[in-house]
Image: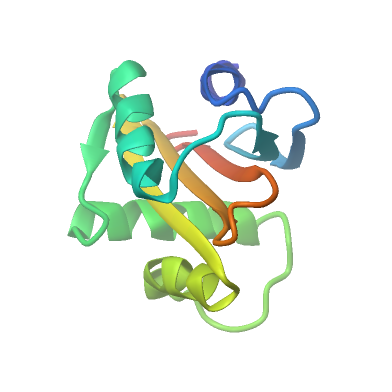
Amino acid sequence: MKTRKIAGQIMGQLEAFEGSKAAMDTTELLIVRGKSRQKIQPEELGPTISQILNDMGAKKLDMFSDETADIISIIDEQIRSQVQIQGETDIYGIYRLKESFENMNCNADYGMGLIDDIAIFIVLWKDKSGVGPLFVELVISALEG
């Protein structure tokens, strides 16, 4: 499946494939978490995400655009079809993600791209102390079933 191939390429590029685990794996949605072996500095998190999307040939999306909000809504529906979640869809919760990581004493960044009808959402974070690994969370969504 195309979602697995894309996830494998990105996790491989981040040297996070070994030991990574799928948090959700359906025909439409793949969520993978892992730890990167790369030593990426906090100021390089955003540029690293941009470079990965560029290397994949993805169209980088503005995180605050209507298009991105629509895609986040689709991904939310895909998740809710598999897991019961209390409360309404909050597409703006994703925008608070970086702030919540920073409140936990982590540096974090995220970005979203689109390859045809496949959405790619990448989150990278690490402890501000510099100790410990770089964590990766990757969401790959087939937007059209």
Residue 21's quadrant in the figure?
Answer: top right
Depth order, front residue of 37/94: 37
Query: Farthest residue in the bottom direction?
Result: 87
Compared across the picture, whether 109 is left or right of 28 comes to left
Residue 67 % position (x, y): 22, 52
Residue 51's quadrant in the figure?
Answer: top left
Residue 111 % position (x, y): 36, 46
Compared across the picture, whether 123 is left or right of 91 comes to right
Q: Which residue is drawn at 69% across and 38% down?
A: 35
Q: Which residue is drawn at 55% across and 64% down?
A: 106
Q: Residue at x 54, y 61 (%)?
A: 128
Q: Is residue 21 above or below residue 129?
A: above
Q: In this view, does 9 lie above or below 60?
A: above
Compared across the picture, whether 99 is left or right of 105 comes to left
> Could you tell me how many numbered marks the image carries?
0
Residue 114 % position (x, y): 31, 33
Residue 112 % position (x, y): 35, 44
Q: Which residue is drawn at 59% across and 18% down?
A: 12
Compared across the picture, whether 120 is left or right of 124 comes to left
Q: In this view, does 75 lie above or below 38?
A: below
